[in-house]
Image: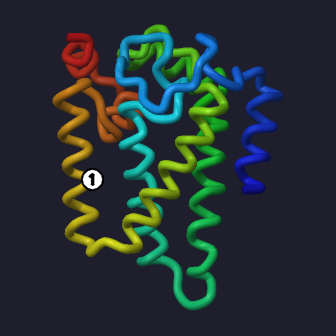
Amino acid sequence: MLVGLAVAGILLAMDRPPICPCGTIKLWHGNVQSSENSQHLADWYSFSHIIHGFLFYAAAHFLLRGEVRRWALPMAVAIEGFWELLENSPIIINRYRETTIALGYSGDSIVNSLADIGWMAFGFWLASRLPAWATIALAILFELTTLVLIRDNLTLNMLMLVWPIDAVRAWQGG
């Protein structure tokens, strides 16, 4: 809760819009090529944030022992909150515009950023309850589904941020 309030406060100070500039808050917005993408509670990129939760849970499972493990979710929330701040900084917004198909990307609304943190926490919780094989299968399903439906996913998103490939950008552009 405190991390969410801190992230919201910092995003407000960064002049991020509290809600979609369209004036509404939708549960789901599925049009990636839209100014409303990354402005509502859920979109195609919510699946990437769920996978973040899977990955944070796996890291905690393998790296943390004993009493420290109870801090795994709060640490994951803090890391995801930091990512939301970084993702909405001019350096990352401009990087997305330069290297990905997100030519008109202007960053997330605060509602979307907080929802993304929530989706990550949901992924963490889900991974804590599912067998490892089911969590891995879900991650693969999410990655393949978004790859087919929107020509993007967590893997491509990270690849294109770190090491852009013109052929991938051309394919993503349709």
**SS type, badge 1:** helix
From the viewer's perspective, is residue 173 above or below residue 8?
Answer: above
Instruction: Report x, y in % for residue 95.
Output: 51, 21
Quarter of the image with the N terminus in it: bottom right
Q: How is the image coloured?
A: rainbow
The one of 60 and 164 positioned closer to us in this rendering: 60
Left or right of 68, for residue 124: left
Instruction: Report x, y in % for residue 122.
Output: 47, 57
Q: Mark 1 points at which residue?
A: 139
Identify the image quadrant of residue 78. bottom right
Left or right of 29, for residue 149: left
From the viewer's perspective, is residue 57 above or below residue 93?
Answer: below
At horizontal 63% and vertical 74% (from top left) the residue drawn is 71
Label 1 amino acid? Ala
From the viewer's perspective, is residue 122 above or below residue 20?
Answer: below
Number of residue marks: 1
Q: Residues within 10 Å of mark 1 (few under 14, many from 20)?
A: many
The one of 112 and 75 positioned closer to us in this rendering: 112
Quarter of the image with the C terminus in it: top left
Instruction: Report x, y in % for residue 7.
Output: 73, 42
At horizontal 62% and vertical 41% (from top left) the residue drawn is 114
Identify the image quadrant of residue 153. top left
The one of 93 and 38 positioned closer to us in this rendering: 38
Identify the image quadrant of residue 29. top left
Left or right of 17, for residue 126: left
At horizontal 39% and vertical 37% (from top left) the residue drawn is 158
Instruction: Report x, y in % for residue 32.
Output: 37, 19
